[in-house]
């Protein structure tokens, strides 16, 4: 409904004052309702249409507005993006956190990655950085996204969450090991949204005034400190407060305790990408900090709750394709699929004019020739021309904003087997396992065992062999936690060589 011009008297949708909002219009005090009761029918009809499709993933979420402040005087070395051009410059933002697999009414403390979707309302358009609280992801080819997400949703027969679907898929997709290790570590059950980091996860690019390109990864480090629920606390919280994270975020902002994150980047000059020993565009891998140290660039603070959850958070639409001048994408295939997938999802979920909703509109001047379509919210361009070129002074392109040309070597188009090209699923999850303290390693193994212990032995065997290859202690720890013996699972020669 459009914003009401506030009336003290209750009205219908079209402004007719209402005389009685308590009693339907009936034939006598005990008789039936008559068709003349336009008020009852209007109320029932609107109520019946209150729900819109929930997000197909990340359906349960919380959000707040905030401010990004640039703190780095050297950003011009890397980019012309205006939000970074001056130290102290503030850009308004919206941040929506979420869980991934659960429905809109699911519990906030499920073991799941958390979404970390940011919109920066910059002076040259909206920049959306639609990340997670982990630096990597389960898959590296978007062709597998729908298959993977099916395993995180409900079993088609039982309508239950299914450890069997999950472990079957993961054990057959070892590129998932890195993300699986993070998911089952303590960070898989963060204590609300304020105590976790956010990561842009993909490799993006920055472009400076000399047209030089730098690949970039974004990190948001919580200033509240990392804090997680134990597996037991997270489970318990589901019955105490299903909306723990929503409540924690809303109430801290309400009382003026504004959560903050230090914003950092890792920078890789364009030429280094070709020779770096890891594929820098592989979303299942991080760039080790030892190779590419983090550089602080700013601070993000959340300081304002939305006034209306549905209008401002449910209807918010984040899209990895939204970058601003001075920024670009990268050859990460997951990112490429996401550039197309999100606007498509929004047209279905919110309708073709979703970008005109107040929360999604840019806060800078803007002008397009898009017109019409379902639910036009504004003046639809009034009587200005709806085609281009035109000789009536309509908005025109400006060549200075052309994308930087990209060169690809004379490559052949084919479906290359990513497993043949890079089968090292083990080094980085192994590094992560080795940096965990023994008690955290123990919790990781028992968190994994809670689900893996319920599935067929052949799936357990395949998955434990993967853990073993990350680190023999990892494989042994999980085997012990599910009450089996490592000798039954890992081949003898590997045990000897370990
Ligand atoms: P470093 O020792 O330089 O970095 C270690 C990083 O590990 C820390 O900065 C921290 O990232 C992260 N970390 C610490 N404890 C945990 C935990 N319990 N769960 C998840 N992450 C944790 O080594 P590398 O850069 O070589 O990274 C080693 C491993 O750390 C990687 O294989 C990856 O699994 C993980 N990691 C690496 C990140 C990166 O960008 N290099 C980012 C996050 C995790 P942070 O400060 O971001 O919390
Ligand atoms: C939401 C697709 C990978 C983070 C969504 C939505 C779709 C989608 C369709 C719902 C959008 C909506 O209705 O508003 C995909 C596809 C992926 C992918 C096709 C891979 C090929 C990722 C990755 C991340 C991520 C790698 C993080 C690094 C998010 C977040 C949301 C989301 C945070 C919720 C945004 C919000 O708060 O509104 N994704 N996704 N996704 N995705 Fe992805």
Image (cartoon, rainbow, N blue to C red):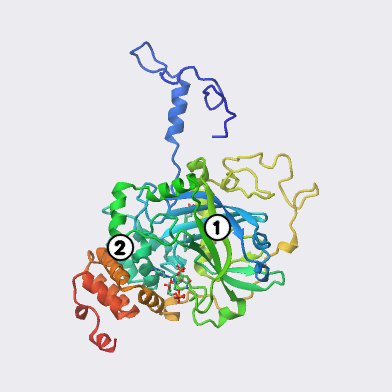
Q: Could you say whether the residue bearing mark 1 is in a helix, strand or loop? A: strand
Q: In which quarter of the image is residue 479?
A: bottom left
Q: Is residue 155 visible from the viewing direction of this image? A: no
Residue lying at 45% horizontally and 20% vertically, measured from the top left: 37
Q: How many labels does the image show?
A: 2
Q: Which of marks 1 and 2 is in front?
A: 1
Q: Could you say whether the residue bearing mark 2 is in a helix, strand or loop? A: helix
Labels 1 and 2: the sequence-earlier one: 2
Closer to the camera in the image, 333 or 387: 333
Q: Is residue 313 visible from the viewing direction of this image? A: yes
Closer to the camera in the image, 231 or 114: 231
Q: Position of residue 263 (x, y in %)?
A: 55, 63
Q: Where is residue 24 in the image (x, y as percent from the top left)?
A: 41, 19
Residue lying at 57% horizontally and 42% vertically, measured from the top left: 374
Closer to the camera in the image, 361 or 33: 361
Q: Where is residue 3 in the image (x, y as percent from the top left)?
A: 57, 34
Q: How crowded is mark 2: few (under 14 residues within 10 Å), some or many (20 or more)?
A: some
Image: 355 above or below 401: above
Residue lying at 56% horizontally and 26% vertically, measured from the top left: 14
Q: Position of residue 118 (x, y in %)?
A: 53, 56
Question: Residue lying farthest top?
Answer: 28
Q: Quadrant of residue 424?
A: bottom left
Q: How crowded is mark 1: few (under 14 residues within 10 Å), some or many (20 or more)?
A: many
Q: What separation in Å lies between label 1 and label 2 (alpha carbons)?
A: 38 Å
Image: 208 above or below 95: below
Residue for badge 1: 300
Residue for badge 2: 165
State left or right for residue 311 relative to residue 464: right
Image quarter in which the N terminus is found: top right
Quadrant of the picture in which ligand 1 is shown = bottom left
């Amino acid at each position: 409904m459009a914003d009401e011009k506030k009336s003290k008297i209750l009205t219908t949708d079209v402004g007719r004052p209402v005389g009685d909002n308590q009693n339907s219009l009936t034939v006598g005090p005990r008789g039936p309702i008559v068709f003349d009761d336009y008020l009852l029918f209007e109320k029932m009809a609107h109520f019946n249409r209150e729900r819109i499709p929930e997000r197909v993933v990340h359906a349960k979420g919380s959000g707040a507005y905030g401010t990004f402040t640039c703190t780095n005087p050297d950003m011009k070395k890397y980019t012309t993006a205006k939000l970074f051009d001056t130290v102290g410059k503030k850009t308004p933002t919206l941040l929506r956190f979420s869980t991934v697999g659960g429905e809109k009414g699911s519990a906030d403390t499920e073991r799941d990655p958390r979404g970390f979707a940011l919109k920066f309302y910059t002076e040259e358009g909206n920049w959306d950085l639609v990340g997670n609280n982990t630096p990597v992801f389960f898959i590296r080819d978007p062709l597998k996204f729908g298959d993977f997400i099916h395993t995180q949703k409900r079993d088609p027969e039982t309508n239950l969450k299914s450890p069997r679907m999950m472990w079957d898929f993961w054990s057959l997709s070892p590129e998932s090991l890195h993300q699986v290790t993070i998911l089952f570590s303590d960070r898989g059950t963060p204590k609300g949204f304020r105590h976790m980091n956010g990561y842009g996860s993909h490799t993006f690019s920055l472009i400076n005034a000399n047209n030089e390109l730098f690949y970039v990864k974004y990190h948001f480090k919580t200033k509240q400190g990392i804090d997680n629920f134990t597996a037991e606390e997270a489970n318990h919280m589901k019955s105490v407060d299903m909306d723990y994270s929503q409540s924690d975020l809303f109430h801290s902002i309400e009382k003026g305790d504004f959560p903050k994150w230090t914003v950092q980047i890792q920078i890789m000059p364009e030429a280094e990408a070709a020779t770096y020993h890891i594929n820098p565009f592989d979303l299942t891998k991080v760039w080790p900090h030892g190779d590419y140290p983090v550089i602080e660039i700013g601070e993000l603070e959340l300081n304002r709750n939305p006034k209306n959850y549905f209008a401002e958070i449910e209807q918010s639409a984040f899209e990895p394709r939204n970058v601003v001048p001075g920024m670009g994408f990268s050859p990460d295939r997951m990112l490429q699929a996401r550039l197309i997938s999100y606007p498509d999802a929004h047209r279905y979920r919110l309708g073709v004019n979703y970008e005109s909703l107040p929360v999604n509109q840019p806060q800078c001047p803007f002008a397009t020739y898009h017109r019409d379509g379902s639910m036009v919210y504004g003046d639809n361009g009034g009587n200005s021309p709806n085609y281009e070129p035109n000789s009536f002074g309509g908005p025109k392109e400006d060549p200075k904003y052309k994308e930087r040309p990209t060169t690809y070597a004379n490559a052949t188009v084919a479906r290359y087997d990513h497993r043949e090209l890079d089968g090292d699923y083990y080094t980085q999850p192994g590094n992560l396992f080795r940096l965990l303290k023994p008690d955290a390693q123990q919790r990781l193994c028992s968190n994994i065992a809670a689900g893996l212990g319920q599935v067929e032995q052949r799936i357990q065997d395949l998955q434990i062999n993967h853990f073993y290859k990350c680190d023999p202690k990892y494989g042994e720890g999980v085997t012990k936690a599910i009450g089996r013996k490592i000798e039954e699972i890992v081949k003898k020669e590997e045990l000897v060589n370990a």
